[in-house]
Image (cartoon, helix red, strand yellow):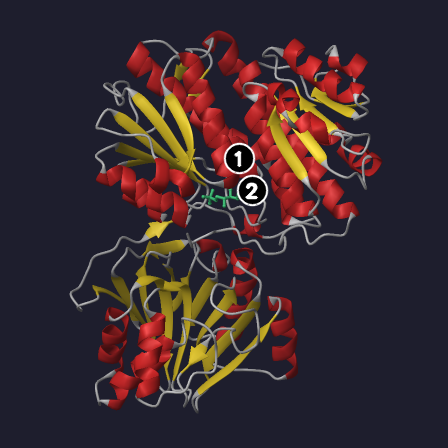
Amino acid sequence: MCGIIGHVGDSDAIDTLITGLENLEYRGYDSAGVAVQNGSGIAIQKRSGRVSELKESIEDRPLKGRVGIGHTRWSTHGPPTDENAHPHTNSTTDVAVVHNGIIENYAELKARLERKGHEFTSDTDTEVIPHLIQQYLDEGVENETAFRRAIDELEGSYAVAVMVSGEHALYAARRGSPLVVGVEDDEFFLASDVPAFLEYTDEVVYLEDGDVAIVRPDGVEFTDLGGNPVSRDLETVNWDPEQTGKGEYDHFMLKEIFEQPTSLAQAIEGRTDPETEAVHLEGFGPGTFDGVETVQLIACGTSYHAALYGSLVLNQAGIPSRALLANEYSVCAPPVDEETLVVAVSQSGETADTLSALREATAEGAQTLTVTNVMGSTAAREADDSLLIRAGPEIGVAATKTFSSQAVVLELLAHRLTCDVLGTSPFDLESFLPELDRLPGRLEGLLESTDARAIARRYQGSQSYFFIGRGLGYPVALEGALKFKEITYEHAEGFASGELKHGPLALVTPETPVFAVFTGQEDEKTLKNAEEAQTRGAPVVAVCPDDHRATEVADAHLEIPPTNPELAGLLANVQLQLVSYHAADLLGRPIDKPRNLAKSVTVE
Ligand code: F6R
């Protein structure tokens, strides 16, 4: 979490920095700040609150400069106050620093610096960095040497960008937190993520752990911390800058829900051929997974629900598979060996919990693969292989389109795996592939005709919201509940429908609507479970096709087009996303930036 941005070039830095921070606000929105070289030194404005408040304050008291850094914060050390906002400086404001990550040895460094007379003004771990640099500058070394020595003392994770008064350059380093350089002729950008500067350039260089980048008006130098040159490729990102704006929509979340016909079409494009009943996953030809005996899918949050979806498909096909919460992995991972494939599922590819589980699996000798939306992300680079979900940038903190793309790509992966390992597909390809092809179109129809807002209004003010499903409907129920609680702040819970009677039924009242997901797998049982709740007074909302028997029993209905059981849950999920969205909208919640959350969770 936290987003950092930097700019070096001929044009004024402030607009670029503010735009970058607006595009990075999904990474944290507790406070925001910028610093520029204004000709006579470093000028800073920073404050608690949103980037929009910082922008207003800069309009009142303009800042100017061609070299600058900026930060949007998700608090870890210290509350979201003006003092704790980045950039942080040394006491004479000669060094300004923005940082994403956690400096684990900051207390010890701070105590040492305080003994030497340094005075600190914030509770943050970051503030030790400008003071360390100052300490080395006071010894008379060059800016670059002072920067390298200070970084060398840090333990923990960081992406940092540093400015020293009077020098038109940015010093940057990464370890464990993402950092990417953007290049557009003689304009250079530094950021935690590409959308920060995508409207200026799509030419990027991803830094690797241990890299240092020194950005000057005439170019960027990449080295290791010791100063030895390293070679890093310039890559072109095929994301459209339009995708990073809200367009005609009130919220990114709604825009991203409506983008799903496109993002799903992108996820499968060129990868399936219904006519020849073939699946081609680039880089994963037949035989790739020969010898794999078990699969573990590791992920967090929404990605975990997609991982669970993938693992259920694999289990149903006969490949022993488990979805595991990445943050639990270090305590209770099932054993792995070289016949185990560990699949990290992560939209961002930067989630600290997932990275740490991936590293553990690698150390234990498993084969590893990352399924991600971000080319060049840490998880993509650290795993043996990576597979892109091609959903395009997702800015809303609540994951929507990436869930459906993850699930579909995991289904294609499951096909490759089971073909290699068992010699057969988990699907009846003759019907599955044409249905997969039709999925984007079916989704378009659903989005045009949904009753989700009316349903959200009808059950507004309920005490609690339950979501149930069986088989592939179970991860969809979990995801429905996560989305609902995340953006409405109302209590919601997802259950395997058969579990309701083993305890949760005690909570059921007329004030607890139950959303029941029907996928075509053992629907009669799910309907029975829904009726058990209904008998106890709970209104039931059936998420199913129009001609489904559940519509005769349920109190309300959210329609999904008929399709294969392996795809029905994805359509149901979109209806549930819409219910959450509208329920949150009716409550006036800040949908794209739910309280206390950030999109990319880079702390464990
Ligand atoms: C919820 C949500 C989170 C993320 C989770 C993992 O809407 O977005 O639960 O799914 O933080 O993030 P990634 O997929 O980036 O690893």
- Kind of residue at disc 1: Phe
Q: Residue at x 39, y 43 (%)?
A: 354
Where residue 10 appears, as percent x and y from the top left, is: 43, 75
SS type, badge 1: helix
| 491 w.r.t. 571: above or below | below
In depth, the one of 43 and 527 nearer the eye is 527
The disc placed on residue 221 is: none
Q: Would you say 81 lies left or right of 579 here?
A: left
Mark 2 vs mark 1, CA separation in Å: 6 Å
| 235 w.r.t. 267: above or below | below
Q: Residue at x 36, y 76 (%)?
A: 128
SS type, badge 2: loop
Residue at mark 1: C-beta within 8 A of ligand 1: yes
Q: Which residue is mark 2?
A: 399
- Crowd rating for badge 1 (residues with CA inside 10 Å; few <14, some 14–19, many 20+): many
Where residue 294 appears, as percent x and y from the top left, is: 31, 22
Q: Residue at x 54, y 46 (%)?
A: 394
2 and 1 marks in contact (CB < 8 Å): yes
Where residue 334 appears, as percent x and y from the top left, is: 32, 30
Q: Which residue is mark 1?
A: 403
In depth, the one of 475 and 60 nearer the eye is 475
Q: Would you say 580 lies left or right of 361 here?
A: right
- Kind of residue at disc 2: Ala
Where residue 187 appears, as percent x and y from the top left, is: 40, 68
| 174 w.r.t. 110: above or below | above
Residue at mark 2: C-beta within 8 A of ligand 1: yes
Q: Quadrant of residue 146?
A: bottom left
Q: Quadrant of residue 367?
A: top left
| Residue 152 visible (yes or no) | yes
